[in-house]
Image: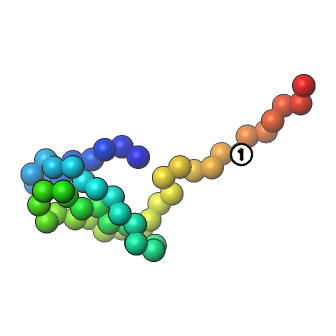
């Protein structure tokens, strides 16, 4: 996940997840975005090579 900034005041947006909801709030003003939670890192299936 990359750092994102508020479009209003250019403050740092802080992510919070509540159950299946995903909220991003600004540290300085009352700006927030709401959406469905996404995994931060997707698991990749790696085949291990035998030596």
Tell me the quadrant of the picture where the C terminus can be found.
top right
Colour scheme of this structure image? rainbow
Q: Residue at x 46, y 73 (%)?
A: 20
Q: Residue at x 40, y 66 (%)?
A: 17
21 with respect to 30 (left or right): right
In the orientation shown, which residue stands out farthest toward the top? 51
The image quarter containing residue 32 is bottom left
In the orientation shown, which residue stands out farthest toward the right? 51
The image quarter containing residue 28 is bottom left
17 with respect to 47 (left or right): left
Q: Position of residue 35 (x, y in %)?
A: 36, 68
Vertical arrangement, residue 37 with respect to residue 1, above or below: below
Q: Position of residue 42 (x, y in %)?
A: 57, 50
Vertical arrangement, residue 26 with respect to residue 50, above or below: below
Q: Position of residue 16 (x, y in %)?
A: 35, 63
The image quarter containing residue 49 is top right
40 with respect to 11 (left or right): right
Q: Residue at x 73, y 40 (%)?
A: 46
In the orientation shown, which residue stands out farthest toward the front? 27
Q: Position of residue 7 (x, y in %)?
A: 15, 52
Secondary structure type for disc 1: loop
Count of residue discs:
1
Crowding near the residue tagged with mark 1, few <14, some 14–19, many ≥20 C-alpha atoms within 10 Å: few
Q: Residue at x 24, y 62 (%)?
A: 25
Q: Which residue is mark 1?
A: 45
């Amino acid at each position: 996940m990359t750092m994102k900034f508020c479009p209003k005041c250019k403050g740092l947006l802080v992510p919070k997840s509540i159950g299946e909801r995903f909220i991003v709030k600004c540290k300085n003003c009352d700006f927030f975005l709401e959406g469905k939670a996404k995994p931060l890192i997707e698991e990749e299936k790696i085949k291990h090579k035998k030596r």
